[in-house]
Amino acid sequence: MAPSPTSSCDLAFDREHIWHPYTSAVNPLPVYPVRSARGCRIILEDGRELIDGMASWWCAIHGYNHPRLNQAVQEQLRNMAHVMFGGLTHRPAVELARRLTAMTPTPLQHVFFADSGSVSVEAALKMALQYWCALDHPERKRFLTIRNGYHGDTFGAMSVCDPVTGMHTLFQGFLPEQIFSEAPRCAFDALWDEAYIQDFADRLEEHSQELAAVILEPVVQGAGGMRIYSPHFLRRVRELCDEAGVLLICDEIATGFGRTGKLFACEWAGISPDILCVGKALTGGYMTLAATLTTREVAHAISRNDGVFMHGPTFMANPLACAAANASLEILEEGAWRSATPRIEAALREGFSACADLPGVAEVRALGAIGVIELRTPVDVARIQAMFVERGVWVRPFGRLVYVMPPYVVSPDELDKLVSAVVDVVRRLP
Ligand SMILES: *Cc1c(COP(=O)(O)O)cnc(C)c1O
């Protein structure tokens, strides 16, 4: 069929033929056509400008249409957009692996480039399984995780997502059955009590002989509930994994690259995982790219007796994506995010506190450049979305959560407008 002659975005065609995330094909939620984006602004086809509160799901940390990221991609494009990674390598990938091994905890020295966050989680699970196979423990095939987690939408990743919000019943019989302990109950700066870790410790002990690894999101649980928990919980998890001889996988796909106020959320607890997943903000939101890092010990065990790591995506280490990632990490290394994130945290905490006592609000919380208003009842997404757009901001709530994680380059004035709009909308909710 010939493309439509209209130059505008064909919303009717979109509605008839395109799946958007988690939507119905017959009764989809409305979508807003975007013409362009720059800095912290999204410009709609009708000319309206929205202040971005989402960083396109944690990704666009330096804002949109960034001159240095644009330049990095354009320069790489003059050399090549892509070559296969089997039998070939290239400067953008080597430079990126060098940066990642330097900026993550020292024990992590081996990098696997994946094409999305979910795939990097699959690679992490596979690394843990292959590690134990290589050590003659093929019976270690299960994973322990905490409730309310989110690790992606592919089947391995889904199996360790929260069983309720991850809709495990839908895929029952197909999805591997993992072990879940209660979600951390201790708030970020709550006084520590060993009771907080008891359920986790019990499950770990009960299943330690069949576990390949523990997997969790350090300190901030993202799409599974936007929960923020005590770094001490993470510290105890690391200790208990060491005592039980079980690997620890930290999924920093959402939290990595400064979002929580530390470069990686693991730093809040001063721990290093055995396997680390990064993605989302890795390319500054330019292209899909993720990575799974691991220790020499895990990598060398997998490689024993001519062993190989059994994964190799077609678009592995895509040079354009690596070039964008190198430019994004270079900007991070310059350090402006270190003053931006506490400034954003203070504004979100202070601004959202105006909602804390509303009857419809259960809790308000913030850490780094993340602010969350947890409501008592789920929102009507289409309606609340329209209210935000009317007020010139882009915020996309889900379930009972209204939350923002703006690009780090958000100006004080933009942040002020964003916070005011969120507070105003939440006040008007039924
Ligand atoms: C988004 C996310 C994933 C999945 O990444 P995709 O790129 O969407 O596949 C995995 N883990 C966490 C913590 C995430 O936030």
Image: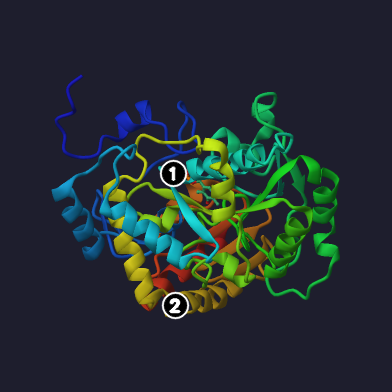
Q: Secondary structure at mark 2?
A: helix
Q: Residue at x 54, y 40 (%)?
A: 122
**Residue hosting label 2:** 338
Residue 297 x, y percent position in the rendering: 59, 53
Which mark sits nearer the N-terminus, 2 or 1?
Answer: 1
Q: Is mark 1 within 8 Å of ligand 1?
A: yes
Residue 28 x, y percent position in the rendering: 45, 34
Q: Nearer the viewer, residue 63 or 128?
A: 128
Disc 2 residue crowd, few under 14, some 14–19, many 20+, Cα 10 Å: some
**Residue hosting label 1:** 116
At label 1, the amino acid type is Ser
Q: Is mark 2 within 8 Å of ligand 1?
A: no
Q: Nearer the viewer, residue 246 or 118?
A: 246
At label 2, the amino acid type is Arg
Q: Secondary structure at mark 1?
A: loop
Q: CA distance from mark 2 to mark 1?
A: 26 Å
The C terminus is located in which quarter?
bottom right
Residue 420 x, y percent position in the rendering: 47, 71
Based on the displayed image, in which of its 4 quarters is residue 217 positioned?
bottom right
Q: As displayed, is residue 65 above or below residue 117?
A: below
Question: As drawn, is 131 to the left or to the right of 6?
Answer: right
Q: Residue at x 77, y 52 (%)?
A: 182
The N terminus is located in which quarter?
top left
Q: Nearer the viewer, residue 423 or 305?
A: 305
| Visible residue check, residue 409 | no
Question: As drawn, is 170 to the left or to the right of 80?
Answer: right
* CB atoms of marks 2 and 1 within 8 Å: no
Q: As displayed, is residue 212 above or below residue 62?
A: above
Q: Farthest residue to the front: give it.
A: 305
Q: Nearer the viewer, residue 179 or 100?
A: 100
Residue 190 x, y percent position in the rendering: 74, 74
Question: As drawn, is 427 to the left or to the right of 406?
Answer: right
